Amino acid sequence: MAQLSLRGIKKRFKSVEVLHGIDLDVKDRELIVFVGPSGCGKSTLLRLIAGLDPITDGEFRLNDKRMNEIAPSRRGIAMVFQSYALYPHMNVYENMAFGARLMGLGKAEVEARIGEATRMLRLEALLERKPRELSGGQRQRVAIGRALVRKPQLLLLDEPLSNLDAALRSEVRLEIARLHREIGGTTIYVTHDQVEAMTLADRIVVMNGGRIEQFGSPRELYETPANVFVANFIGSPRMAMLTVEREGNRLTAPGIGQISLPRLPSSRERELLMGVRPDGMSISSGTRQDGFAAKVVYTEYLGDSAYVYVRMGDGAPVSVRCGPDTQYAPDTPVTISVEPEKVHYFSRETAQRLAV
């Protein structure tokens, strides 16, 4: 069992504050993903939870026990680092046994735990190999196995796939998802890759500038982003964001065109930010009165679909998801239409989501 509570967590390095009052509750057996751009504070927050760095202000509780002053080795937490951090002179078995022996476990218990971890991670044939004799994916599985041997209440993973190629990233990501289900523990996973976050997480913490922008399920973040930052960060290709002026039920984008929509925000703001994801738009040749004018940049064929990348009249880049047979030549004039139920509205002043 591992339930976490973070209240008012701040971290300063000398005079620079990098975390600005983090409040977060994590339930038992959840797989939580911290995601955000480089420098947003996600790895720093993970290190505070692990006890590798001291908390400047605030309180961290694990299973309702205050952890601020507890040494890392006594927290019941294991962490897997981006760099694997394997001992090069030890074979796989010795690497996995090292931490368990420091816990004072007997030989039989160490062997039992290693046997269980190697079966879960499919490492039985690699126990005698040194790290230099392993692939990147195998090294990552050994690093995870070393953490599992300690049987932690909480498993922390700090960008564990960043050193792997695309094929291995997909393979190891599936292993991590399967492993989380099998061990039934609580896991916190840090990444800058929003695709990893969307595919792995029960809930996602989106961070930016040392603050939490939104905390929710992948579906909540994708379908109801709390602000412009989350809307742009979650989803690939990113959401198109246009500045529009409202007059009745018509929205006009200066220099681009205008459209009529039945659903508009209940707020009285005249200038809005209108966001639409690639699957919420359609494209047609030529120019039309009701729609946004654009010119094609290029078409990307993906087998089951195609993305048409266009540049709007004001220079804004936009991508539209189309059928696989769609093909437009560069510089072709087109009109972009939107599906009303898939439009998101944000305040131009605060960048926060507006209710419809």
Image (cartoon, rainbow, N blue to C red):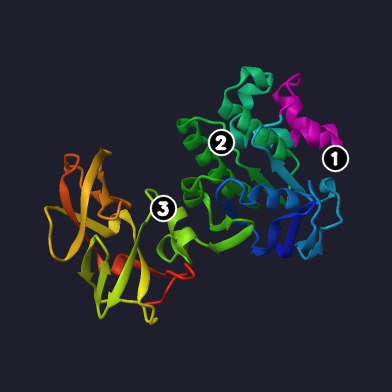
Q: Position of residue 205 (x, y in %)?
A: 57, 58
Which residue range is magenta in the image? 86-112
Q: Residue at 81% of width from left, 63% of height from top? A: 65
Horizontally, residue 18 falls left or right of residue 284, namely right
**N-term mark: 1 or 3:** 1
What mark, if any, has residue 162 been given in the picture?
Answer: 2
Q: Along the horizontal axis of the image, is 307 left or right of 113?
A: left
Picture quadrant where residue 284 is located: bottom left
Q: Which mark is residue 12?
A: none
- Gap between marks 2 and 1, in whole Å? 30 Å
Badge 1 crowding class, 10 Å Cα cut-off, few under 14, some 14 to 19, many 20 or more, is few
Q: How many marks do you count on the picture?
A: 3
User: Which residue is disc 3 drawn over?
Assistant: 235
Residue at 57% from the left image edge and 52% from the top image edge: 33
Disc sitting over residue 103 in the figure: 1
In the figure, residue 25 lies in which quadrant? bottom right
Picture coordinates of residue 199 (x, y %)?
A: 47, 49
Q: Amino acid at mark 2?
A: Ser
Q: Label 2: how many residues lie within 10 Å, few (<14), some (14-19) or many (20+)?
A: some
